[in-house]
Amino acid sequence: MKNLSLILNIVLLAAVAYLFFDKISGPKKPMPATTANTTTGEPVEKPLKVVYVNIDSLHEKSTAYQAIKKQLEKKYADTEASLKAKQSAFEKEYKEYMAKAQSGTITPNEAQKYEESLGKKQQAIVAQEEKASQDLKEQTNRFDEKFVGDIKHFADSLKQANSYDFVLIHGGMISPMLSANENLDITPVLVELLNAKK
């Protein structure tokens, strides 16, 4: 039993020593991309080819994006106007009902029918609002999915044709890059490809 305890202590001591030396030695540096020197065969560091796409410029200059944006904005404005008109008519009818109820010019039976009718109209307005919101969301999501797919397709083609290692996104609300060298911006080429796509 004492031998087992001694062996466990040695194993634990070795593990602690390993962890201590591993942490003291510092973080490991990533290996740079390498290619072989054609004359000597020795590995030679190859700089990474990184470019980026400015998503804000892409949205602004893409004809497809601008067209769908205008279409969705118009649909939203039309839906909002229709709902406001229905809501206004409902409020007018409700005020008329309240005036009649307070003046006592309607019977309890008529009041109940009014309330049921108003309740149904209000539910219909809420249902139409929810459906319109859902339709707009679905249409936006479908377009975004297709648009992002087109961007990825053309970015992959450019990456392959020009031997880029990375194509990053710059701009937008959650850009991973805080700033970028404008010489590495391939947005104009990507915009041209997207706009030429039928």
Image (cartoon, rainbow, N blue to C red):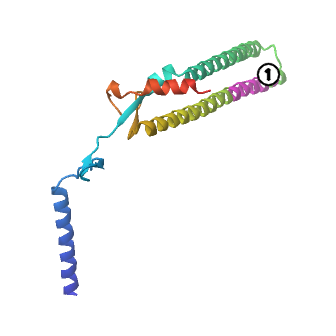
Residue 120 included in the magenta stretch of the image: yes
Q: Is residue 127 in the magenta section? A: yes
Of residues 162 and 139, the one nearer the viewer is: 162
Q: Is residue 151 left or right of residue 6?
A: right
How many numbered circles does the render carry? 1
Image quarter hosting the C terminus: top right
Where in the figure is residue 91, as x and y percent of width and height?
Answer: 69, 16
Q: Nearer the viewer, residue 15 or 142?
A: 142
**What type is the residue that disc 1 sits on?**
Tyr
User: Quarter of the image holding residue 80?
Assistant: top right
Q: Which residues are magenta?
A: 113-128
Residue 166's place in the image compared with 70, above or below, is below
In the rendered image, which quarter is residue 98 located in? top right
Q: Residue at x 16, y 56 (%)?
A: 25
Mark 1 nearby-residue class (10 Å; few <14, some 14–19, many ≥20): some
- Residue in front for this viewpoint, 173 or 50: 50
Q: Main secondary structure of the magenta part?
A: helix
Quadrant (top left/top right/bottom left/bottom right) for the N terminus: bottom left
Identify the element where label 1 is drawn: helix
Where in the figure is residue 106, as x and y percent of width and height? 82, 16
Between 146 and 175, the one nearer to me in the picture: 146
Residue 15 pos. (x, y %):
21, 69
Badge 1 is on which residue? 114
Q: Does residue 27 appear in this view? A: yes
The residue drawn where x is 15% and y is 56% is 24
